[in-house]
Image (cartoon, rainbow, N blue to C red):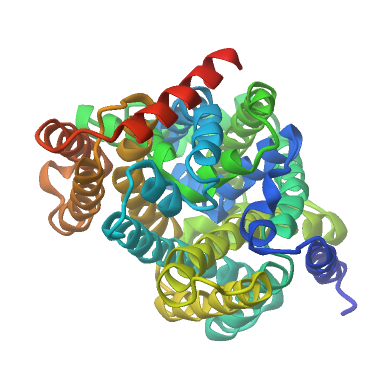
Amino acid sequence: MQNPMILMFILYILSMLFIGWLGYYSTRNLSDYILGGRRLGKVVTALAAGASDMSGWLLMGLPGLIYLSGLSGSWIAIGLVIGAWCNWKFVAARLRLFTEKFGNALTIPEYLANRFEDKKHYLRISAASIILIFFTIYCSSGVVASARLFQNVFNIDYSTAIYIGTFATIAYVFIGGFLAVSWTDTIQASLMITALIFTPLFIIYYNGGITPSMDVINQIKPQHTSLFANLNLIGIVSLIAWGLGYFGQPHILVRFMATTTPENIPGARRISISWMIFCLLGAISVGFFGIAYFALHPDLAGAVNENPENVFIETAKFLFNPWIAGFLLAAILAAIMSTLSCQLLMCSSALTEDIYKTFFRKNASQKELVFVGRLMVFAVACIAILLARNPNSGVLDLVSYAWAGFGDAFGPIIIFSLLWPRMTEKGALAGLIIGALTVLIWRQYNWFEIYEIVPGFIFSSLAIVIVSKFTTPPSEAVLQKFHEAKNQIVKT
């Protein structure tokens, strides 16, 4: 407790718990708990969407990838920026209006059920099940990242760090729900961008400047300075294709659904994309210039050589005084907590709104639903801990698996549901299942060494179009709502 770095870390956790407590007193019903009552402003919407997107992989996985493979890993960042901008531009406002027009849906499965008149609940059950499967994998990546961070900061064993790191996250989600998650995400996004601007600048300074850093890297790993090193066309396409995942990420889409009005979207888009570009450039710079730093200080490189995903943690500890280092390490926890908290909440909403309320307790009170929602947060966190018990799990590997799963299962469905009135319930169900199965199967066999999100997105889109063309068209009521929402989008 006399260590300033650890004190800063603990103060940060306590401040997040305090915000969770404030969120508790603003949560009156299930809509507040899982969607914030649709009252987020553009700044909170923008930063919350960015923070919930950029999980621990931003400060651990991506710098580790760049440290290991060089600038060629930057193609992921290029694809992500393109995909995020397109998602904000073509999906955000439409989804906000469509979810309200079709039954004021609170979750993605509920929106799909209302949009396609899913009277037998096949689509709703399938969507909720896929959310639970892939979000549990996604949550486990956050648990791994938080465990590694707590293991490093507190010098404790991995198995103990899992429980402490997970508790730090689930506590304020359990208490405050969506409002607490969104408010903390805004703070966490600010903390993340501050850390990713100053840390690479200090690394460059201690290396003697950009030119000396480049000289060192060219001397020891010249291939790391090229965007095309060790990559063929398939490799580049696979990295850029990460951008396709944005269209289907429920924890990002729900931010669009929660904004106050569609008119907030353009301003939120500019804030979010600017924030994203600065963060990605910072993360890439930490990994890249970290190569030179640890080459110049080989006596400090033990933890990084053992696991490149520690590069941000180690540079923060060595370059800054303990108070600032604690602040920077809290930024890693911020990245982890912002995404993991939203993922836990999404799993909770799927279990509570789409399964418990729909099939077991249709007349449940709001108080009961909020209680069940909190209980589901705890249950999913326990499962994620079990999946994360292997200390050799890779954060980026787990994220890439879940990212592709959501991108392929939900991405094409969301896009077609907002743009194509002829899409049918059976077409949506086919696209959902084909997209998810393609990821699960392709992941096992890795055909053509291409990222599974590429074939999954294509096959899911084809399934939607083909099945919709050969099944009964949507009803007049659905078409009317579609065109009413579409006309509102034109006006905004």
Say which residue appears at 51% left-offset and 25% top-offset.
85
Say which residue appears at 67% left-offset and 23% top-offset.
263
Locate residue 360, reporting x and y percent.
43, 77
Say which residue appears at 19% left-offset and 55% top-offset.
437
4 with respect to 314 (left or right): right
Q: Quarter holding the C terminus?
A: top right
396 with respect to 332 (left or right): left
Q: Quarter holding the N terminus?
A: bottom right
Q: Residue furthest front?
A: 476
**Residue 176: quadrant of the picture:** bottom right
Q: Residue furthest top?
A: 491
* Residue 230 showing in the rendered view: no
Could you say which is closer to the camera, residue 153 or residue 456?
Answer: 456
Say which residue appears at 82% left-offset and 66% top-offset.
5
- Asked if 268 appears above or below 443 in the picture, the reply is above
- Asked if 302 appears above or below 185 in the picture, the reply is below
* Residue 376 showing in the rendered view: yes
Locate residue 389, reporting x and y percent.
44, 80
Could you say which is closer to the camera, residue 42 or residue 53?
Answer: 42
- Asked if 250 appears above or below 413 in the picture, the reply is below
Could you say which is closer to the camera, residue 255 or residue 210?
Answer: 255
